[in-house]
Image: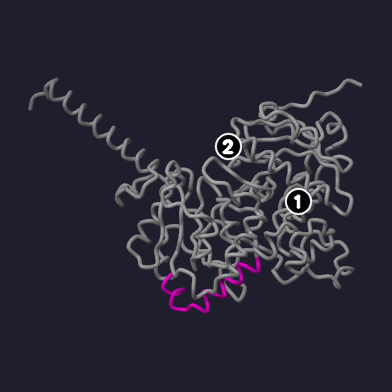
Amino acid sequence: MGRPSLSRLRVIALLLLSFTGIFISSLWFGMNSQKDNVPSLLTQLIPAGHCTCSSWTNFNCTSSLADGTSFPASSVSRERAWSFQYPRDGSNIALNRSQCATAFPGLFEDVNRAAAFWESSGGITTEKLDNIPLKNGMAHAAIYNGELYILATKAAQHDHRRKIMAVLSAVYRALVAAPESVPEIEFVFSIEDKLEDVAGPGLPLWILGRKSSEESVWLFPDFGFWAWENPNVLVGTYSQMAQRIKESENKMVWSEKIPKLVWRGNLAFAPKLRRRLFEVARDQPWGDVKEVVWSRKDNFISMEDHCKYQFTAHLEGRSFSSSLKYRQACNSVVVSHKLQYIQHHHYLLRSSGDDQNFVQVERDFSDLPLKMEALLSNPERSQRIAENSFKTFHERYLTAAAEACYWRALWDGYAKVSHIMANKTAQHGLPYESFILQESSAIMNFEAVAVEA
C-alpha cells in the first residue's frame, strides 16, 4: 500500500483541527452558559474545574449544641444563672467571654482547631506573617490598645474594596462593643474565594472558607454579615434581611408554603455541579430550579421569596457559597450536597438525629429524588427540620451577638499562639476612623507610611 497523498493528510489534519475546535468550543459553552440549554452528554464531559466534585468535608464538632464547654471556657460557671434568650440577646454585641461561651457552644470549633495547629507548629511569628504576599483582595491590619489600625489594603476593583471595607467595619463593630479588654494582634486577611487564589499552605492567613486540608488558616465571618450589595441586587445588612424574613415568616404557616425545592443562581459557577442539579430536578413535580441571567434578572426572586418554599437548595460555587446564611434565615428545609468548603459556622450543621437542621444529599444528587419524596410524604418531619434550622441559625448562631462573639474569640485564639508585638507596627497604621474617610481610589491600594521617630 502506498503512502497517503499529501492532500489526504491535509484533509485528515483539517478534520482533527475542526473536531478539536468544536470540542473545545462545546466545553467552553457548557462551562460558561448561564442558561439551562446544555445537553446532558455535554454536562458529563464538563471538567469539575473549580469544584472537586469527588471530595467532601466531614465536620468533626467536639461541642454539642446543648453544652457550654467550648472556647473560651473561662469562668463559665459564674454565668450559669444567665442564659441566652432570643430575641432579647440576639442583637447584643457586647456579651462577655463567659456569656459567649454559654450562648454559643460549638461556634468556636474552627478557632480551637487553628489554635491547636499553630501551637503544635511553634506559633505565629513576624517572619511567617511577612511571608504572606499581599495581593488584590487582601488587607493587613492590627488591633492595639483597643483600636483598629489599617496597615495596607489591595483591591483590583470596587467589589474587592466593598468586601474589604465590610470586613474591617465588622471587626471595628465587635471591637468597640467589647465589654472586656481584647488582645493586641497583627493579622492579614483575604476576601477571595479560595486560599490558592492568594497564598500557599502553611501561612496564618485569615480567610472566608477552607478545605479540610488547609489547616493553617483562620476562618472569619463573611462580609455579608456587615452588609452586601452589588450592581444586580441590594441585600443590605444581614440583620435587616433576617428581620424582613422573620416578618414574612410570621405571616405564613408551614402548610401554606410552596411544597417545592427552590434554587436560583448562576450556572457558570461550578457548572458540572449545578447543571447536575438541573438534570435531576428537571420535570420533577417538586422541582423549581432555574438559572438567573443577571443582565436581565431572568428568573430572579428575592431571598424573602425563597422563604415561601418549604425546601431551598444550597450549592457551592467556585468555592463556598455565602448564600447559605440567607437560606438558614428561612423557616425552610435547607437541602445541600456534601460540602467541600468549611465556613466559620458550619460546625453547627446536623444532617441526622433529633437536632437535624438540614438534609444532606450526594454531590451528584443521585439520592435527591428519594429524599425529596421522603420529605414530602412526611410533612411533620420536614417541618421539624425546618424549625430546628430556624432556631439554631436565625435565632442563635447567625445573630449579631454570635458574630461579635466569634470575632472576639478569633482574636483570643489567634493571640494565644502569636508572638508578634502588634505595638511595633500598629503605631505606623492609619486608625480605622481615619481610614474610612479616604477616597475610594486611596483605599484600593493603601499602604501606611512609617513615621520616623
Q: Is residue 266 in sight in this rendering?
A: yes
Q: Is residue 114 above or below residue 389?
A: above
Q: Which residue is mark 1?
A: 407
Could you tell me which residue is drawn at 79 percent across and 56 percent down? 93
The crowd level at tag 2 (other Cα within 10 Å; few <14, some 14-19, many 20+) is: few
Asked whether residue 377 is drawn in magenta, I would say: yes
Question: Which residue is nearer to you in this view: 222 or 78?
Answer: 222
- Judged by depth in the image, the label closer to the viewer, 2 or 1, is 1
Task: State the residue lying farthest toward the right.
Answer: 453
Does the residue at mark 2 contact the one at mark 1 (Cβ under 8 Å)?
no
Q: Quadrant of the N terminus?
A: top left
**Magenta segment, which residues?**
372-392
Type of amino acid under label 1: Trp
Residue 178 at x, y = what percent? 84, 52
Q: Is residue 322 above or below residue 196?
A: below
The quadrant in which residue 157 appears is: top right
